Amino acid sequence: MARPKIALIGAGQIGGTLAHLVALKELGDVVLFDIAEGTPQGKALDIAESGPSEGFDATLKGTNSYADIAGADVCIVTAGVPRKPGMSRDDLLGINLKVMRSVGEGIAEYAPDAFVICITNPLDAMVWALREFSGLPVEKVVGMAGVLDSARFRHFLAVEFDVSMKDVTAFVLGGHGDTMVPLARYSTVAGIPLPDLVKMGWTTQEKLDQIVQRTRDGGAEIVGLLKTGSAFYAPATAAIEMAESYLKDQKRVLPCAAYVKGAFGLDGLYVGVPTVIGAGGIERIVNIALAPEEQAMFDSSVEAVRGLVAACKGIDSSLA
Ligand code: APR
């Protein structure tokens, strides 16, 4: 059977890291697309030349032509601009919306059957716009946010508790970043919920609140340190986890920016919710009951996403 074809739209920091991970994990053959001439070709060749040492079998091709993504099984989109210090994700909206139009049209023409994972920020609005521009089924277009946010949360919790991060689970809902809704009662160490760990004296509520805030600001913390761009290793790894679940029909339960209609009382909006990702794309949305304060946080997250979608419609009248 032929290897899956994985198209990476955007060959910048995240795109290059994605290509490297796909090759190392032998998830499939890679087509790295970018508008910058030479960048995708150079990165593809550089990674391919690591193959003999690593011992992976994968072909890598860099391109400036959408025709080369033809028939891709998975497209991961990072095209656009990242944040600089002092910028919010929302500041990227105007520029990246135009990029989503060209990417959406390219995918619609050459890879209409692909499972599409959007990483470009501001995530919840860009994945919505990408779906609109591409016209692909909603269950095949999804945004990467929750896996990254929960990975950051899990990392901080594992350090705080001095336990393996393998035994730490975290449950997050809502938009990417500032309006993220961590659900402490569903976040655990080996099944023990965080509120119980506070009662057991493993940590204090105050420390937990600080960790939640640090998680919300996780992207900005990296931007502040790097100064020239935003996070790329962890975002790439998170998207690969989602792509692998689709390609191998793993049916992982992963928080993603998915199109929600009906569940959580929503009437059709991309927002971060727990999903099941399998061969059908987003196969299920895990619709849990929220406590009043969780619902309030989720509602304000939903409002923030609605605001960004309205801003997109204001900029591009074809979306209205
Ligand atoms: N089509 C294809 N590629 C494009 C386009 C376009 N219309 N416009 C820009 N690009 C490419 C750039 O040439 C660049 O190589 O997108 C790439 C983006 O790479 P980086 O600037 O290194 O950004 P990166 O760190 O990879 O982040 C990409 O993901 O997390 C988000 O906020 C982040 O929106 C940003 C995106």
Image: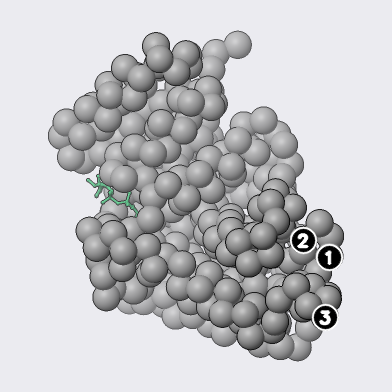
Classify mark 3: residues with Cα within 10 Å, few (<14), some (14-19) or many (20+). few
Please indicate whether residue 48 sits to the left or right of residue 2 in the image: left
Mark 1: which amino acid?
Ile
| Rendered location of residue 305, percent (x, y) | 49, 75
The quadrant of the picture occupied by the N terminus is: top right
Q: Is residue 27 above or below residue 256?
A: above
The quadrant of the picture occupied by the C terminus is: bottom left
Q: What's the residue at 53%, 27% (across, down)? A: 25
Mark 3 vs mark 2: which is more N-terminal? 2
Circle 1 residue: 192
Circle 2 residue: 189
Q: What's the residue at 65%, 73% (across, down)? A: 182
Circle 3 residue: 199
- The residue closer to the viewer here, 235 or 215, is 215
Q: Quadrant of residue 45?
A: top left
Does the numbered disc 1 mark a residue whose Cβ is under 8 Å from ligand 1? no
Classify mark 2: residues with Cα within 10 Å, few (<14), some (14-19) or many (20+). many
Q: Quadrant of residue 97?
A: bottom left
Mark 3: which amino acid?
Lys
